Image: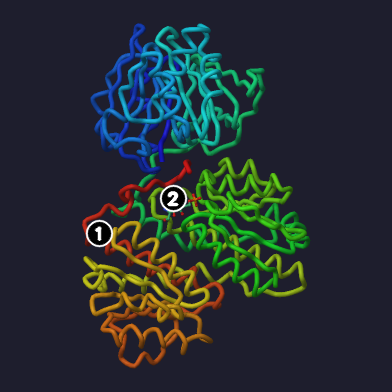
Amino acid sequence: MCGIVGYSGKADAAPVLLEGLARLEYRGYDSAGIAVLNCGAFSVVKRKGRVDALAEARSLPGHLGIGHTRWATHGAPCERNAHPHVYRNICIVHNGIVENARALRAECEVRGEAFASETDSEVIAHLVAFSYGQRGDLLAAVHAACQKLRGSWAIAVMCSDLPARIVCARMRSPLIVATGKEECLIASDVPAVAAPGRLVYVQEDGEYAQVDGGHVAFYDAALRPVSKRPVACDPHTDLPQKGGFTHFMAKEMSEVPQALLHSAIGEDDRQYLQLFKVLCQTQYIYIVACGTAYHSGLCAKLAFEEFARIPAEVCFASEFRYRTPIFPKNSLVIAVSQSGETADTLAAASLAKACGIRVLAVVNVPHASLTRLADHCVYTDAGREVAVAATKSFQAQLASLYSLAALAAKARGRQAPSLAGLPALARETLAVSQAVRAWTPYFVGARSVFFVGRGADYCAALEGSLKFKEITYLPSEGYPAGELKHGTLALVDASTPVVVVLTCRRLAEKTLNAVHEVSARGANVFLVTNFSCDTGGNVRAGVLLPRCEEAYSPALSVIPLQALAYYVALACGNDPDKPRNLAKSVTVE
Ligand code: M6R
């Protein structure tokens, strides 16, 4: 989603901004721009499309600047709507959504102010310019403008009167400040600015920061100074490399075995005892998450119930945040998120906290907002995931969540199966999954595709379907195999590819009924299984995976589904790393 970079220092700002924006490209965006201040005037270059299109801006003179990658919410993705937005002597970039933008815009228009874009963000430039005109102080003006906003924002503001100053504000959208030798950088994400020798400070909701060359000062919501400590973070944030793969998605799928290995929680882990205590007390679990993380939550629910006999409920965070949930005694909310910045997941976790419920975050990105909000945190250790379509982070979440289920089982004197063999099995699965490339012609151009299964296989089917629609742009649905005949079967005909996931042996006969039902309607059936079964010749092609513990099977069975989505996306001519309309980190509602 949108990204922010800012620079104040002795170096030329433009190359620093372009480098920072390039590091944020993985988040997904549809236009980009930078503004540099020189001799009291802003030079602004904005382009629809990729950061590369800003190359001409590299030579802009000036030591102060802000840049932005925009993921359109209000107004089409075009140059006019791209950030930065300039109004009079004020220049801003904004991440988030100003929910009351229409009303605020109307107020500005009453004053005779004209707008240059259709964005909600531009109104911030107008509000700041108005307040600055009254107060003559940029920090106070940004503060006054923020009092009028509803919604979410991370803002960086420059004023053409102030040659070294950027003022930042944050509410429900991440923002960090990095200080170096006689320079300060701001960004929406650590990788944009972290480098050896720089200190990174995380701005909290409601806080303000004022940057002047090498100096930064932080203020609370009432503009009282606050002192902050830098956070420890990996300074080696070079641009992510594809390491010989054509796409990040292919590279990240190949990293599934390591993700499984590193994300399992072992007895020697620092937080093992603390988590054990938390799970000892837990009698009810809510898992809140979005997208792929929601699917890992569905898999985990089965494991918590089966191994630990703890009732668990999985909720879309976007729904949960507006519920009035009933929390049974000793409830625990587990918030799962690769980025740790998903607005809905943060809101769901905040709701739980406000109700006095403990929150355990399962997050892949260090220092993410969710980790600071949660009472307890488990870092999945998948490494950086660049492709918008989540792959290795799904299996990493499974390894962490299955470990928690095993720990919860232990806390109740029960025993869950070991996860130790999964990484090696994942390696075997990656090898056999290459076969799905041959299935591609049956999927390209399909009107609709179904992914079906039962139990844990249904969870894998849901994730396979999400991956498929996300990067192929073909309609697909994940469905419980037993439910087809209750309505969805009406959609199946000879043009419908149906992927059946079947690793759950005890339900094999039942799942095979679905194979017969769809093939009787002429559908092409593709089977993902880990045992040989009699399909009555009704299967067009299949892939045989290594056997594993039934409850853990989605960690493997999703691999050929990820590969299928990837190959079909390539055959459709799509860029699997940057699917249209989607962003890696969904920081708005
Ligand atoms: O960063 P999060 O795990 O909170 O993101 C949640 C979803 O936005 C994410 O999983 C999304 O569904 C992926 N693009 C799916 O591949």
- In the figure, is residue 400 to the left or right of 1? right
Q: Residue at x 25, y 69 (%)?
A: 443
| Numbered disc 2: secondary structure | loop
Residue wearing tag 2: 385
**What is the x, y in percent for residue 464?**
40, 66
Q: Amino acid at mark 1?
A: Leu
Residue 198 in sight here: no
**Camera-side residue of 299 and 20:** 299
Residue 403 in picture, x, y percent from top left: 63, 64
Q: Amino acid at mark 2?
A: Glu
Vertical placement of residue 492 versus 393, above or below = below
* Label 1 CA crowd tier, 10 Å (few <14, some 14–19, many 20+): some
State the quadrant of the N terminus. Answer: top left
Q: Which sits earlier in the primary sequence, circle 1 or circle 2?
A: 2
Residue carrying label 1: 570
Question: 414 left or right of 454?
Answer: right
Q: In this picture, is 525 found above or below 138?
A: below
**Is label 1's Cβ within 8 Å of ligand 1?**
no
Is residue 255 placed above or below 12 in the rendered structure?
below
What number is the disc on residue 3?
A: none
Question: How packed is label 2: few (under 14 Cα within 10 Å), some, or many (20 or more)?
Answer: many
